[in-house]
Amino acid sequence: MTQIENRTSSLIRDVGRLHVRLQQETAECCSGTTMTECTILTEIGRNGSGTLIELSNRLGLDKSWVSRAVENLVQEGLLSKVVNDQDRRTVIISFSPAGEARFKALNTNLNAQSERVMARVGATERENVERALQLLLTALEDEYAASRQTAPCKG
């Protein structure tokens, strides 16, 4: 690996790690929501209700982990579970009115944080950063899709 490749790899990991850390702090401070719960609320808010398996697949998280977090959110009155009309063996997980309000507040706080970060980038460079982020997102989505097609890592 060349020095430039090593620097790029390090930058991607550092950006991801620091962004997640900031998002965690915002989620925990502003809403009293854990990162897993925040992720579930955000997923439902952005992409709609679903079954536990659908949510687990969309998030790429273990079903039992998502199940525990969903139960906590149901107990807090933020999510509701209703029997699925298409498959009575499953339930649809969706927002309660309080969950909708929590999502909106959380989303507002997380977006404001991202806007503050981008405001630290010079105005002349913002468009380049946004273009680079879109390219990186596409590459990450492609890599994630490819990784789901191969056998899990053994180590």
Image (cartoon, rainbow, N blue to C red):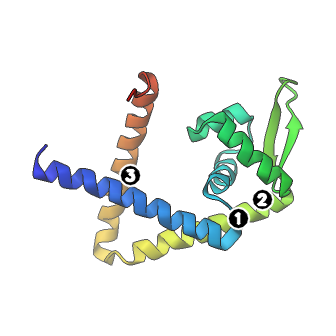
- Describe residue 100's horizontal placement relative to residue 47 as left or right: right
Instruction: Name the amino acid type tagged 2.
Output: Glu
Q: Is residue 90 above or below residue 94?
A: above
Q: Is residue 24 above or below residue 88?
A: below
Give whichever of discs 2 and 3 has the lower sequence position.
Answer: 2
Q: Residue at x 14, y 53 (%)?
A: 4
**Is residue 34 visible in the rendered structure shown here?**
yes
> Whole-Å distance between the Cαs marked 2 and 1?
6 Å
| Residue at image location 70% in from the left, 64% down from the top | 104
Image-based side of 52 in relation to 116, left or right: right
Packing grade of label 2 (10 A; few <14, some 14-19, many >=20) is: some
Front: mark 1 or 3: 1
Q: Which mark is residue 100?
A: 2
**Labelled disc at residue 122:** none
Question: Residue 130: percent from the left, percent from the top?
Answer: 37, 61
In the rendered structure, which amino acid carries the disc numbered 3?
Gln
Q: Are marks 2 and 3 in contact (CB under 8 Å)?
A: no
Q: Quadrant of the N terminus?
A: top left
Residue 41: x, y in percent? 69, 53
Say which of marks 2 and 3 sits in front: 2
Residue 65 % position (x, y): 66, 41
Badge 2 marks a residue whose secondary structure is helix
Asked if marks 1 and 3 touch (Cβ < 8 Å), the reply is: no
What residue is shown with label 1? 104
Asked if labels 1 and 2 touch by Cβ distance under 8 angstroms, the answer is yes
Identified by mark 1, the residue type is: Lys
Crowd class of label 1 (few under 14; some 14 to 19; many from 20; radius 10 Å):
some
Q: Residue at x 68, y 54 (%)?
A: 37
Q: Quadrant of residue 59?
A: top right
Q: Which residue is mark 3?
A: 134
Q: Quadrant of the C terminus?
A: top left
